Amino acid sequence: MENFFIIILPLLIGYAFGKGKVFDDKAPVILNQFIIYIALPALILLKIPTISFSSDILIPIVVAWFVMSLSAILILVISKILQFSKEITGSLMLVAVLGNTSFLGIPMVTSYLGNDALAYIVIYDQLGTFLALAIYGTLIVSLYTNTSKFSFKNVVQKVITFPPFVALVFALMLAEFEYPSAIIKTFEMLSLTIVPLALVSVGLQLQLRLPQNTFVPFSVALITKLIFAPIIAVIVCKIFGYSGFIADVAILESAMGPMITAGVVASVAGLAPRLSAAIVGYGILFSFGSVYFINLFFVA
């Protein structure tokens, strides 16, 4: 219960401050930039070198891509059966497939599994969700709008210039290097800012207005993201014989609510902006309950 309040209170503070217009409209952007450019790279540089590399390191990556691929296929099939518009289908292909595996994943998964999970959360997020956002997200926008074209060059540029990904590459290169104690303390101090800043930022961006006549696609999105995705993660782990701590991290990561950035991308691309925002907002709130039950019944 204590861990729940540690997560929900900063989220509610952010939401209240957003509604009260306490901060400038650019506040979430500034908080996100600090996390992306400073705090998250510090965490990656601190934790990745502590990983004992083995075939088990592939577990988060395999689970992430299976979950996202099968979720996308399910959305396509349901959208065709229910005859969703191209705009709504494009929206669901983003917000019902891509999870909030860093800003929400870090505080939620560590609240259940502890700080030892951080390195594997980073692997799931950077080599799973982030790569999918860059590659798959760009492809979806190009397919479901008439204003952009898929560019492999742009995708590569996004990946290799994304600060956490750059930090991941350096962290892998420095696996055998021992940081001086002052560097370790600096990285620890910066990485500790991720949880409160990320949760406040998420709260500031929450949108809970559900547009009329969108209950069906809204429900499809949340069922896919909060129920179908973690169940697929559990099945994948069973099929491949994955078990233990790393598999638990991957399962909980798969259960995270929709990615805020995916909602922003959908909105900017004109893919059902209000519906996308509502799915992200309610999805994040509902994920507190769904993750609790996933942890209760499927995590060792």
Image: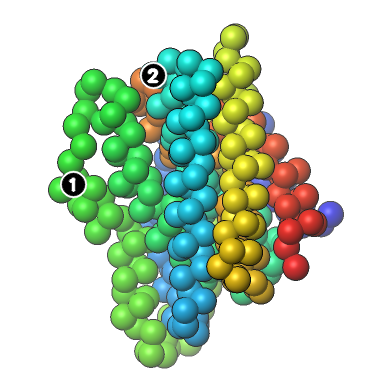
Q: Which residue is mark 2?
A: 86
Number of numbered discs: 2
34 left or right of 17 in image:
left
65 left or right of 105 in image:
left
What is the secondary structure assignment of the residue under circle 2?
A: helix
Give residue 251's quadrant in the image.
bottom right
Q: Is residue 80 visible?
A: yes
State if disc 1 and disc 2 touch (CB < 8 Å).
no
Give residue 115's quadrant in the image.
bottom right
Q: Could you tell me residue 45's position as x and y percent?
A: 42, 73
Which kind of residue does numbered mark 2 sit on? Lys
Q: Could you tell me residue 275's position as x and y percent?
A: 52, 21
Q: Residue at x 65, y 50 (%)?
A: 231
- Vertical order, 30 against 144 (above or below): below
Position of the N terminus, as image quadrant, is: bottom right
285 left or right of 88 in image:
right
Give residue 261's quadrant in the image.
top left
What residue occupies the far left of the structure in this picture? 153
Cα separation, mark 2 vs mark 1, equals 23 Å
- Label 1 Cα neighbours within 10 Å, binned few <14 / some 14-19 / many ≥20: few
Asked whether 201 or 122 is in front, the reply is: 122
Q: Could you tell me residue 15's position as x and y percent?
A: 63, 33
What residue occupies the far top of the structure in this picture? 212
The disc at residue 152 is 1
> What colour scheme was applied to this rendering of the protein?
rainbow
- Vertical order, 169 against 175 (above or below): above
